[in-house]
Amino acid sequence: MVAGCSKSDTAKATKPTNSSYSSGNPITAPVDYLGAVGQAKRVAEKTVSRVSSEKDIQLFHEQEGRYPKDLNELVKEHYIPAVPQPPYGMVFEYNPVNGQFRVVKQ
């Protein structure tokens, strides 16, 4: 009796990281690229808005000993010049009880 290992030539199909934007067609590559750039821009704007606002809320909490009642209180107390606009298609959710701040889709 002979025993051995056999190698299978079947390769696992991997999903490209930009699969939602890439059709694999060279003719549509510019459109696919622009879609990926647009998505990356939206993600970056959301992240920057969230991190910046969380920092301002935490600074208020450290100095005042409580969380602001709403985001407008950050303006009234001169922590920020104005409440920032959420990225397109998003809204800010703020919980004054625990200071939790989120950027969510409308």
Image (cartoon, rainbow, N blue to C red):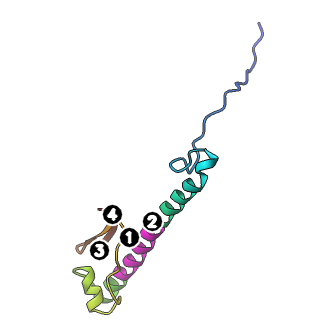
| Residue picked out by circle 1 | 87
Q: Position of residue 102 (x, y in %)?
A: 33, 67
Q: Residues within 10 Å of mark 1 (few under 14, many from 20)?
A: many
Mark 1 touches mark 3? (CB < 8 Å) = no
Which three-letter amino acid code belongs to the residue tagged 4?
Val
Residue 46 lies in magenta, yes or no? yes
Return the residue at label 3.
99
Picture residue at 29% right of the left edge, 86% below the top? 74
* Observer-nearest of 34 and 14: 34
Quarter of the image with the N terminus in it: top right
What residue sits 34% from the left and 77% below the top?
A: 85
Q: Which residue position holds label 4? A: 104
- Identify the secondary structure beneath mark 1: loop
Sequence-wise, which precedes: disc 4 or disc 2? 2
- Could you tell me how far apart the alpha carbons at marks 2 and 3 are, in whole angstroms? 24 Å
Kind of residue at badge 2: Arg
Asked if disc 2 and disc 3 are in contact, CB closer than 8 Å, the reply is no
Circle 4 — which element?
strand
Pointer 2 residue: 42
Which is in the foreground here, disc 1 or disc 3?
Answer: 1
